[in-house]
Amino acid sequence: MSRLTITLSEARYRALKEAAAQRNKTIGQLIDESLEFYGIKSRDDARDLVRRARARSRLSGEQALAVAQKQVRAVRRGS
């Protein structure tokens, strides 16, 4: 697993640390779950999503990709 260093205000760091403790999670787990919620995926995960969508719906590759992109945009907008 990769490591990342970020800079947060002291208040934001305390809030993040408190939220993680309340959920019995590490800060890293909380951030990872947040990224998942916002649709941040690896290229392989995105390709797998398209493959599964295409297999289930019998869409063409282009159609399945359009559906996947629409879903990612919706998640990122919070819709």
Image (cartoon, grey):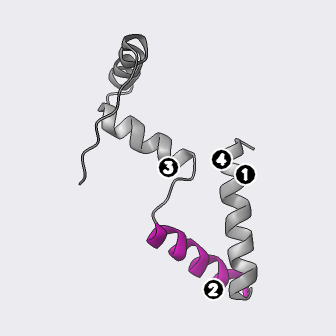
Q: Nearer the viewer, mark 4 or mark 3?
A: 4
Q: Which quadrant would the N terminus be assigned to in this image?
A: bottom left
Q: Main secondary structure of the magenta part?
A: helix
Q: Residue at x 70, y 59 (%)?
A: 71
Residue that carries the numbered disc 3 in the rendered image: 36
The residue carrying mark 1 is: 74
Q: Which residue is mark 4?
A: 76
Which residue range is magenta in the image? Answer: 43-58
Give the amino acid at mark 3: Glu
Residue beneath disc 2 = 55
Distance from label 3 to label 2 (Cα)? Answer: 23 Å
> Residue 74: x and y, percent?
72, 51
| Whole-percent x, y for residue 75 in the image | 66, 49
Determine whether label 4 and label 3 are within 8 Å by CB: no
Label 2 environment density (alpha carbons within 10 Å; few <14, some 14–19, many ≥20): few
Q: What amino acid is found at the position of numbered circle 4 in the picture?
A: Arg
Q: Residue at x 65, y 76 (%)?
A: 53
User: In the rendering, at what x and y percent does residue 49 appear?
Assistant: 56, 72
Looking at the image, residue 56 sits to the left or right of residue 36; the answer is right
Label 3–label 2 contact, CB within 8 A: no
Sequence-first tag of 4 and 3: 3
Q: Secondary structure at mark 3?
A: helix
Q: What kind of residue is marked 2?
A: Ala
Do the residues bearing badges 4 and 1 touch, measured as CB atoms within 8 Å?
Answer: yes
